[in-house]
Amino acid sequence: MNYRNVLSILGTVLLAEGILLIIPLLISLGTGDDCLIAFSITSLSAVVIGLSLSMFIKKTTDLTAKDGFIICGISWILLSLFGALPFYLSGYIKSYIDAVFETVSGLTTTGASILTDIELLPKSLLFWRSFTHWIGGMGVLVFILAVLPLSQSRAMHLMKAEVPGPKVGKLVSKIRFTAQILYAIYIALTIIEVIFLLIGGMPFFDSVVNSFATAGTGGFAIKNASIAAYDSAFTDGVITVFMILFGINFNIYYLILLGDIKSILKNRELHVYIGIIVLATVLIAFDIYNSYGSVGEAIRYSSFQVASVITTTGFATADFNLWSNFSKTILVTLMFIGSCAGSTGGGIKVSRIMILIRNSIREIKRMIMPRAVMSVKIDGKAVDNDTIAGAHSYLCLYVLIFFASVIVLSIDNFDLTTNFTSVAACFNNIGPGLSMVGPSGNYSAFNVLSKIVLIFDMLAGRLEIFPVLMLFNISAWKK
């Protein structure tokens, strides 16, 4: 491993966070709340340490794939440790582990919270809490790639480590331009959502922070009742649509800009993603119809919760913990499926599930016709064996980590539904689960060990396991 290169890029990441912390610092200054010192200390510390690492450590040109994974894993840990300081230093979160939990939940766009009364937080902390969603949604390293002139090989290693999906590709020949295009689309969609929410009568501050949470598919609300507090069918509709939009592979939007409608219409992942949303919405709406009294209201609440769960956003307009087992089972299933590859959403990903299912069908056919030459195809293109092997490795590690986490959480002696859905919600970056951690609950009751396990799950889920596990591989740290 090239330590100089790694430390230099980590310094740049910290410097970026220190600069971004100036925004909530200015909000604190403007509102006159008691968080100014906390934000000042955190921002200054991040800037000073970041500059020291990025400017005074001699850089080299070498960067391997291993370095990219190490940089990605450490970057997210550092961002979380520094990002937690404003919550802790201001005194609004008494335990540093709880502050880290809240920050990791924000950056990984999970939305799981240990806070029992969100509305007690001042605007500066509420902004930073939701802003972490927006920062983590597209990815910090993708942002760094958009502003730094790195070589193609170095940039590709960083992008592969952070961008979700079974396979990472470029939109254009230059990785830096790809990152810039992705962020331009991301910013544009966020601004459009803010405008629509303002049209619906939502206050400006609320519109901005809720758009941050939607864009990052994170789900941190600034009201204890989440989006249900606004009690607006228009607002529910806007957020439902934008949750679905941010759960789509961002390559689709680039194809729209190019006018390549033909390729969009052929995209099987998009078809499956939309199909699952429509089917789940109809089934749940039919199931909850008697509770809401009209088809319109049933569709309104079912579509919002379906979009929120499959995109792993975590907003709520209803306490689905009170729904029937049929509806809850559908929602738990959607937790695992997740959104599209290359989106801001979490979960296993629709494309990865498609690859696994089609490869399983191929293996069954090969048992019947062992001499036949068959390939796994997505959108008419054969999927290479490395991608298929990667999908199977991911699933194997996913299952092992999932059940190991559930076993550790069982030490708290909570019910199985709570433990199982807590891990499902954190590992898949959703936020609310069922029972104690339902939409009206939180994660404050878990002990320190359980919270550390869930922190690990959130990071592993957002970074798709491998960058986090690489940190525990001794050979990865050798020069």
Image: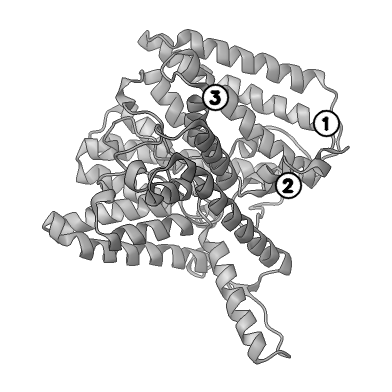
C-alpha span from label 3 to label 2: 26 Å
Q: Residues within 10 Å of mark 1 (few under 14, many from 20)?
A: some
Q: Quadrant of residue 67?
A: top right
> Are the residues tagged 1 and 3 within 8 Å (C-beta)?
no
Kindly identify the amino acid type of the residue bearing the numbered disc 2. Met
Residue 349: x percent and y percent?
A: 53, 58
Which of disc 1 and disc 2 is earlier in sequence?
1
Kindly identify the amino acid type of the residue bearing the numbered disc 1. Tyr
In percent of the image, x 48 and y 34: which residue is there?
A: 106
The residue at which mark 3 appears reads as 83
C-alpha span from label 1 to label 3: 24 Å
The quadrant of the image that shows the N terminus is top right
The residue at which mark 1 appears reads as 3
Give whichever of 353, 210 is nearer the camera. Answer: 353
Disc 1 element: helix
User: What is the tally of numbered marks visible in this picture?
Assistant: 3
Which of disc 2 and disc 3 is earlier in sequence?
3
Which of disc 3 and disc 1 is earlier in sequence?
1
Residue 44: x percent and y percent?
A: 60, 12
Left or right: where 466 falls relative to 456:
right
Give whichever of 240, 186 is nearer the camera. Answer: 240
Above or below, 392 against 179 in this view is: below
Tag of residue 156: 2
- Examine the rendering and report whether any part of residue 407 can be seen: yes
Disc 3 element: helix
Give whichever of 186, 232 is nearer the camera. Answer: 232
Q: Quadrant of residue 121?
A: top left
Kindly identify the amino acid type of the residue bearing the numbered disc 3. Gly
Q: Residue furthest left?
A: 293
Left or right: where 196 falls relative to 466:
left
In percent of the image, x 66 and y 33: which residue is there?
A: 75
